[in-house]
Amino acid sequence: MTDSIERRTLLAFAAAAIPTLAYGQAGASEVAQKSRSFPGAGKQGLEVPKDNAIYGASQAAFEKYGYSPAVRAGGLLFIAGAVGVRPDGTVPESVAEQGELALRRTAEILRLEGLSMADLVDVTSYHVGIADNLKEFLPVKERYFERPFPSWTIIGVEALARPVLKIEIRSVAALRD
């Protein structure tokens, strides 16, 4: 199948129906070379290289809070919630800049896996003060997504992990054959 929507849909349904599909696929990416398997779980946690310019010092949070930036399972790549943090760990005030940084982090995980934003099949964004801040985020989002769009769920929340954070973006991508 050459149609990317059809391929993504098929992969998503196959992954749900056959949990063992495509586990442990070998990739030519830096992340695949620095992955961590979870015995018996059919999943592979990924690590961002320590010298990564996009993540910088902020990647210490993965170890501190005990989570992977992304996990491969069932032909899909599940990307943890990305927030708008600069490589030095500081957080900009504007929703637009936070959104830009969060999407840049998402794009970086995808790049490390040999994927692009076009491989996303599902995106969930969490917004503090959604009524006031969504309009500032939408132009940023438009620069990162093209047709065919992934599914997108927008959720307004009272707060995120740090009071200064205004947006968090969680994504799922279809792995390539």
Image (cartoon, rainbow, N blue to C red):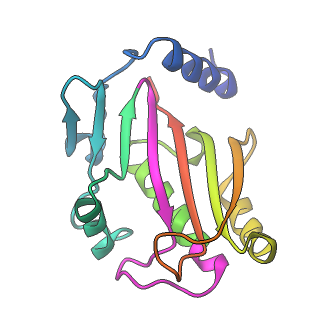
Which is nearer the eye, 110 or 18?
Answer: 18
Q: Which residues are magenta?
A: 74-98
Q: Quadrant of residue 25?
A: top left
Placement of 57 over or under 78, stated as above or below: below
Residue 20 horizontal side relative to residue 36, left or right: right
Q: Residue at x 66, y 77 (%)?
A: 96
The percent position of residue 122, horizontal first and vertical second, equals: 62, 40
Q: Residue at x 71, y 54 (%)?
A: 154
For the image, the number of numbered tags is: 0
Which is nearer the eye, 62 or 163?
Answer: 163
Q: Residue at x 68, y 41 (%)?
A: 150
Residue 170 horizontal side relative to residue 77, left or right: right
The percent position of residue 116, horizontal first and vertical second, equals: 52, 46
Q: Residue at x 45, y 75 (%)?
A: 85
- Asked if residue 34 is among those painted magenta in the image, a careful observer would answer no
Residue 133 horizontal side relative to residue 76, left or right: right
The N terminus, quarter of image: top right
Placement of 50 over or under 133, stated as above or below: above
The C terminus, quarter of image: top left
Placement of 12 over or under 52, stated as above or below: above
The percent position of residue 54, horizontal first and vertical second, equals: 39, 69
Residue 22 horizontal side relative to residue 28, left or right: right
Which is nearer the eye, 160 or 16?
Answer: 160
The outermost residue toward the top is 18
The percent position of residue 39, horizontal first and vertical second, equals: 18, 28
